Image: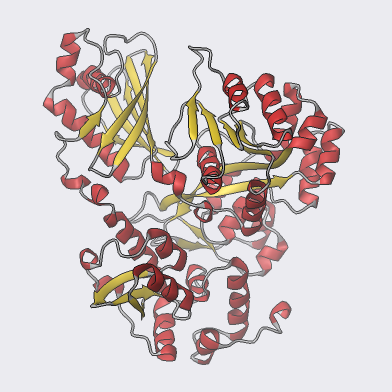
């Protein structure tokens, strides 16, 4: 508390103390932490269970003379549509409630956020007034409102499952019996329902799996597989054939794996792509669909979960005219989204960007994207060579898999180009030693690699039902929490589960290890030091490893200790 001795409480903070809602020491500490974390004071109090949202709202109402509304009593379908952009609503935690003439009334939990009102006024051209609401209800209402705004998503429950428009061919003409089975109305309706339910539920993958005496469909939601349906095993062949017809595969070929793609048009303005792969198994063809959501590539860096210092390092590296940014992690850890986010930041009319991907997952307007193909001899290395003859500013290579690709990429980074790529390693220091093991000279690594990002995705606790979780200090220390963190008196939470989430979790948050190539680290690379030595130096220079970053997310109340252990276990 001594570090907060000089903090002078004014405005809302002082009002909360005077009204007996907060003790002065707690208020000062919370005020400091909220400023450090760059989140609203009221939001920090509610998220950390330092006070209930309701007395805070009424105290703020009394202080500023702003009316309070209970969001539970507001009919969401009557809220004004498409009047405030999503990024502004998320940035300022503001929800349009109703309009009267040229006046727009906006739900907020922090009446001191004048910048929000000014920005909304500028973008809408309407006079803007604040209405106070409880902070925890505001978060839920904004998410519900944004879900409803996507009309194609909102109509999925009542969608015409027979009439969904699927863009693609009719497959091969061989095997008419299978084709007729694939076009059976019940099969068409079942497959469409599975795809639509997966989109609506926020799944990333769909698994159609045949076994000897059973058949099951599973969705991967927030990184975890859940069984959602068990149709009759007799339908296995028909379901696989239908999916192959939709994705332009040869429906008569069942002996070898096949790749395809489905574009499902849900409305005139909304389409979802699926990347499809079939695999012959002992009891039939397993089909896996990866849902490719274009909106995930345009989330913006603030939505990815970087800490402020990590975000600053990434933005600084992107601003450099040359160098190499490497993103590393296992499959499904969000590497592509991190790269696409960086490309979107760089994507301006003045910059020539080319990417080589296997395959191209999401179309980026203004970016020259190339599908590499081993069949025709177009490898990452070959695509990269061609890029360098096309006057590039920024080059993105989907993955560095071999010495040839690594050598060309590093040469490009040394000759005035920004190069972005991925590797499959477990941590940032291991990425450097992996390049050395490939045969890349240490000098080239030290002079070309500017930033390495190792990442994982952890499930985000549901803000509606998460429960406090008491853990003894000695256990926290054993788990890797610092004494400084423990002294702040943070609250850990555990999942509970409600009708708004899946087993107590909803969505995911990024866990990052961002390591800048400093002079000291470059010197270790030149000496061909081990990844352990590089990791020690990264710690000395204050770069959090994945475990430390995950613990920080638990301290912030975003995820659970159980989830920290799941994604960062040794």
- Find residue 503 and report its horizontal and vertical position in percent: 39, 49
Q: Where's residue 120, x and y in %?
A: 39, 70
Occupied quadrant, residue 251 = top left
* Nearer the observer, 26 or 510: 510
Q: Is residue 526 left or right of residue 423?
A: right
Residue under the point 79% across and 36% down? 446
Would residue 328 be seen by someone viewing this image from the given angle?
no
Residue 376 higher or lower than 425, as above or below: above
Q: Residue at x 33, y 24 (%)?
A: 209
Where is residue 397, by image quadrant? top right
* Image quarter of the N terminus: bottom right
Q: Is residue 391 above or below residue 30?
A: above
Q: Is residue 468 left or right of residue 484?
A: left
Between 272 and 407, the residue placed more toward the observer is 407
Q: Is residue 44 left or right of residue 225?
A: right
Residue 129 horizontal/vertical position (percent): 35, 80
- Residue lying at 49% horizontally and 12% vertically, measured from the top left: 376
Q: Estimate the x, y position of residue 481 in percent, counting from the top left.
A: 67, 57
Whether residue 357 appears in this view of the structure is: yes
- Residue that appears at 46% across and 44% down: 297
């Amino acid at each position: 508390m001594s570090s907060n001795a000089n903090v002078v409480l004014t405005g809302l903070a002082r009002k909360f103390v005077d009204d007996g809602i907060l003790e002065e020491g707690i208020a000062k500490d919370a005020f400091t932490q909220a400023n450090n974390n760059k989140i609203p004071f009221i939001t920090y109090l509610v998220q950390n269970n330092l006070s209930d949202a309701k007395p805070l709202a009424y105290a703020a109402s009394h202080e500023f003379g702003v009316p309070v509304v209970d969001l539970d009593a507001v009919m969401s379908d009557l809220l004004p549509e498409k009047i405030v952009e999503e990024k502004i609503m998320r940035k300022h935690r503001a929800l349009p409630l109703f309009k009267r003439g040229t006046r727009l009334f906006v739900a907020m939990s922090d009446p001191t956020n004048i910048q929000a009102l000014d920005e909304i006024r500028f973008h809408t051209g309407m006079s803007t007034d604040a209405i106070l609401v409880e902070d925890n209800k505001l978060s839920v209402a904004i998410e519900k409102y944004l879900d409803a705004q996507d009309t194609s998503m909102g109509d999925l429950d009542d969608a015409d499952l027979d009439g969904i428009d699927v863009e693609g061919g009719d497959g091969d003409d061989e095997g008419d019996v299978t084709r007729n089975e694939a076009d059976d109305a019940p099969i068409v309706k079942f497959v469409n329902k599975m795809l639509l339910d997966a989109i609506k539920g926020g799944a990333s993958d769909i698994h159609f799996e045949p076994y000897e005496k059973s058949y099951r469909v599973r969705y991967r939601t927030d990184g975890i597989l859940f069984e959602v349906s068990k149709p009759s095993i007799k339908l296995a062949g028909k379901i696989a054939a239908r999916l192959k017809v939709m994705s332009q595969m040869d429906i008569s070929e069942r002996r070898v794996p096949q790749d395809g793609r489905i574009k499902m048009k849900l409305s005139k303005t909304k389409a979802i792509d699926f990347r499809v792969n079939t695999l012959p198994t002992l009891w039939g063809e397993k089909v896996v669909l990866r849902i490719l959501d274009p909106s995930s590539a345009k989330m913006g860096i603030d939505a990815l979960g970087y800490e402020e210092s990590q975000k600053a390092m990434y933005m600084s590296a992107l601003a450099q005219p040359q160098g190499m940014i490497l993103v590393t992690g296992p499959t499904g850890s969000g590497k592509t989204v991190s790269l696409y986010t960086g490309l979107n930041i760089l994507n301006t009319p003045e910059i020539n960007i080319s990417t080589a991907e296997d395959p191209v997952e999401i179309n980026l307007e203004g970016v020259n994207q190339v599908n590499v193909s081993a069949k025709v001899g177009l490898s990452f290395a070959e695509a990269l060579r061609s890029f360098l003859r096309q006057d590039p500013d920024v080059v993105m290579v989907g993955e560095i898999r071999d010495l040839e690709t690594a050598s060309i990429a590093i040469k490009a980074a040394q000759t005035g180009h920004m190069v972005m790529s991925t590797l499959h390693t477990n941590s940032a220091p291991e990425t450097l030693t992996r390049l050395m093991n490939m045969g890349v000279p240490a000098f080239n690594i030290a002079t070309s690699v500017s930033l390495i990002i190792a990442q994982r995705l952890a499930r985000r606790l549901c803000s509606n039902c998460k429960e406090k979780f008491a853990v003894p200090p000695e256990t926290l220390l054993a788990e890797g929490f610092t004494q400084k963190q423990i002294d702040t008196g943070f609250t850990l939470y555990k999942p509970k589960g409600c009708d708004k989430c899946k087993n107590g979790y909803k969505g995911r948050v990024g866990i990052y290890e961002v390591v800048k190539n400093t002079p000291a680290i470059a010197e270790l690379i030149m000496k061909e030091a081990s990844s352990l030595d590089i990791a020690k130096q990264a710690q000395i220079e204050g770069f959090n490893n994945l475990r430390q970053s995950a613990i920080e997310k638990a301290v912030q109340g975003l995820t659970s200790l159980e989830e920290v252990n799941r994604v960062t276990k040794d």
